[in-house]
Amino acid sequence: MTAMPGTLPDLLDQLAATLERDAAHSADQGRDQAVALVRGRLLQTIGNLHLYEFFLPPEVRIGADLAASLLLGEETEPTEGIVLFQEGERLVLQVFDAIGEVVPHATLVPDSSGLALTISHRLAEMSKAGASYTLGPAERLLPIIDAGQSGDRATLAAVTPTSVLTPLWQEDETARRQKVATLVVELIRANKRILLVTPDHQNADLITLVAARAMKAAGLTFKSWLSRYELATSKESAGIPLPDLGFEAQMHQFYAKSRSDKAALRKKYDRFRELTPILAYKAQKQKDLDEVRLLEWRLVTQLSDYQAKIKDIDATLAQYEQLPIWKRLSMQAMGKNVESLREYKVIYERYSAGLRQEVDIAKKRIEELIPEATVPKELKPEFAELKEDVIHLGGTKKIRELLAAEENTNRQAFVQNRRVIITTAARVAADPLFQKVRFDVLIAQEAPRIPSPFLLAAAGLVRERIVLSGDLREVTPQGAWSLDDGLSRLV
C-alpha cells in the first residue's frame, strides 16, 4: 500500500501520475478493444442527445462514464457517446447523433485511456492552479481518505461534523437518501449552489427522484432548481417526471422558449415597423384635415359676415324712403346712399360667391381627407401596445441588436444557473464543462463507492462545505478510496 501524501497537492500529483501510467498501459491490458454490440434500440431523444440500449457478448464488462466511439459500418460515419451503465449483458449509451430507431449491430470502441488521461490532467491542474480552485474544503478529505484506505471505520465514525465537512453515515440506504434530500432542501433555502455526485447513474436517478419529492413536499419548484446532468435512464415515478429534470431537456426547453420568444419579438418588431409608416401617414393626413377644417371655418365665418352685411343693406334699402331726413343726410355724409349701398351689395355678393366656391373646395378636400386620416379602431390599441413594448425593451435599436445576436447554447452559463446539479463523480472529473463551474456545497452520495480521484476532482469545485453520505460497512482495506489500484478501480 502506497503511503498517504501529507498535502493535498502531493496527493493530487500522485493520483495524476498513477492514472497517466495506467493510461499508457491500457492498450497492453486490452481495455480499449472493440466490442461487438447487437440488438440496439432508441430509448429516448431529448434535444441533441439520444439514449440507446445495446446488448453485449457474455462476460464482457464496460466501465461506466467511458467515452466511446460507436461504429455502424463502412458507409456510416461513427458517432461519439458516453457509457452510462451496464446491467448484465445490457449496455445503455448516451450518444450525440441519432442512429435510427433500431440498430441491428454496431461496434463499440471504449476509450478508458482517454478517461484516465483526462482525469490525470484535471488533477494535475488542480494541484498547480492555486487560486483557480478552492482546495480548502477538499483538504479536509485527506484524513477521511487515509482512514478509508486502511479500512479504519472507527476513525470515520468518530469524525465530528463541522461547517466544512459533514459525514452522514447510516446503514439504511433509504434513510440515507431521505436525509440527503432533506439537506438539499435546507441548502436551497439557504441560497446555496449544490453539486451532488454519486458513484453511478442508477444512484443518480434515484437520489434525483427522492430530492424532487422532498422539494415538492416543501413547496419548492423542483423543475426550476433541480437538474440531472445526463439523460435519465428511468421514467416518471410517483408524479415526478425524471426525464424533464435532465439538464439537456431543461436547456433544450429553455432555448426553445428563447427561440419562440425571439420569433414573437421579431413578429412584434415587424408589425411595429409595418404600422409605424401607416400611422405616421394617418397622422399627417389628420394634420392636413385639421388645417383644411380650420380654413373652412374661417371661410364660412367670412361668408357669414358678408351675408349679414348684405342682409343689412337689403333691410336699409327697403326702409330707405321711410328713414328720417336727418338719418339719410348723416348716411350720405358717410358715403352711404342708395347707389353706394347697391354697389356695396354687389361687391359683397361677389365676395360671397368666391367664398362659396372656396368653401365647396374645402368641403370636397375634407371628404377626401377623412378616409385617409381615419385610423381603424383595432389599430390604435395594437400600435399603443407595440409602442409600449418597444420602449420597455430599450427602443428599436436595442431590439435590432437582440434580433441580430446569434443564439449560442452556452452550456456553462446554463449550468451555472442551476441550483442543484446531480451527476456521477466520474463525469465531474472528466467533463471539461465542470472545469470553470463552482459550487457552494458538494454532497457525495454513497461516498465510499466513489474512487478518490473522482471525489477529489469534485471537491476542488466547492467553496464552503463537503457532505459525505454512505454506509461505513462498505469501507474496507483496498476499497473504493484505494490509491493503489489505479485505472482498474476507475473503469
Image (tube, rainbow, N blue to C red):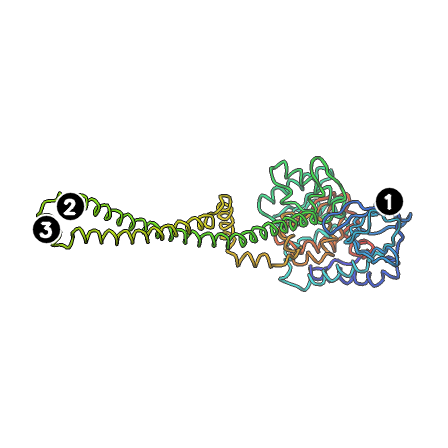
Q: Circle 2 is placed at which residue position?
A: 320
Question: What residue is at 72 percent from the left and 56 percent from the top?
Answer: 431
Question: What residue is at 69 percent from the left and 59 percent from the top?
Answer: 8
In 3D space, how far apart are the residues under numbered discs 2 and 1 (Cα atoms)?
130 Å
Asked if disc 3 and disc 2 are in contact, CB closer than 8 Å, the reply is no
How many neighbours does mark 3 have within 10 angstroms: few (below 14), some (14-19), or many (20 or more)?
A: some
Residue type at tag 1: Gly
Answer with left or right where residue 185 lies relative to residue 272: right
Most distant residue in the left direction: 326
Residue type at tag 3: Leu
Asked if disc 3 and disc 1 are in contact, CB closer than 8 Å, the reply is no
Question: Between residues 440 and 82, which one lies in front from this camera angle?
Answer: 82
Answer with left or right where residue 479 lies relative to residue 300: right
Question: What residue is at 17 percent from the left and 50 percent from the top?
Answer: 338
Residue 1 occupies quadrant: bottom right
Most distant residue in the right direction: 58
Tag 2 secondary structure = helix
Tag 3 secondary structure = helix
Question: Between residues 156 and 451, which one lies in front from this camera angle?
Answer: 451
The percent coordinates of residue 479 (x first, y second) are: 79, 50
Q: Circle 1 is placed at which residue position?
A: 88
Residue 435 occupies quadrant: bottom right
In 3D space, how far apart are the residues under numbered discs 3 and 1 (Cα atoms)?
135 Å
Q: Circle 3 is placed at which residue position?
A: 329
The answer to which of marks 2 and 1 sits earlier in the sequence is 1
The percent coordinates of residue 87 (x first, y second) are: 84, 44
